[in-house]
Amino acid sequence: MEFDPGKVSDFLLLFEEVRGQIAARQGCTHLELCKDASLENVYYTFSIWEKEQDLESYRCSELFEKTWARTKVLFCAKPQAYSLVSN
């Protein structure tokens, strides 16, 4: 996620506010926030979910809806999301 440089601190505060709630969602086994090594305003969230249905349930939740509404206004570029499976 690429944030407006002046809004990074707003995002970090928001993430800390909701981190525990997201991590407590059914099926979430891991959640972390990573900062890009060279770009000060680029962050990545990395989460692991037991089942794809658990992630979809979170994405359809009020928590996600409210968090996303507060997050997307902080971006300066279109966010990207990827779902991965391990081999």
Image (tube, grey):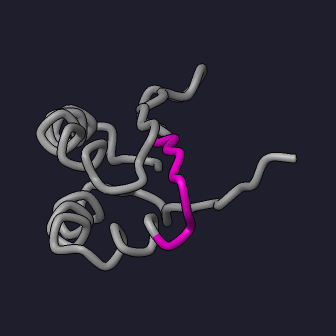
Q: Quadrant of residue 69?
A: bottom left
The residue range painted magenta reads 45-53
Q: Quadrant of residue 14?
A: top left
Q: Position of residue 27 (x, y in %)?
A: 42, 54
Would you say 38 lies left or right of 45 here? right
Tell whether position 44 is magenta.
no
- Name the residue nearer the viewer: 69 or 75: 69
At x 49% / y 44%, what residue is drawn? 47
Would you say 70 lies left or right of 86 here? left
On screen, residue 85 above or below 54: above
Q: Position of residue 24 (x, y in %)?
A: 25, 45
Would you say 87 lies left or right of 85 here? right
At x 17% / y 64%, what residue is drawn? 63
At x 44% / y 74%, what residue is drawn? 56
Q: Position of residue 76 (x, y in %)?
A: 39, 56
- Name the residue nearer the viewer: 11 or 17: 17
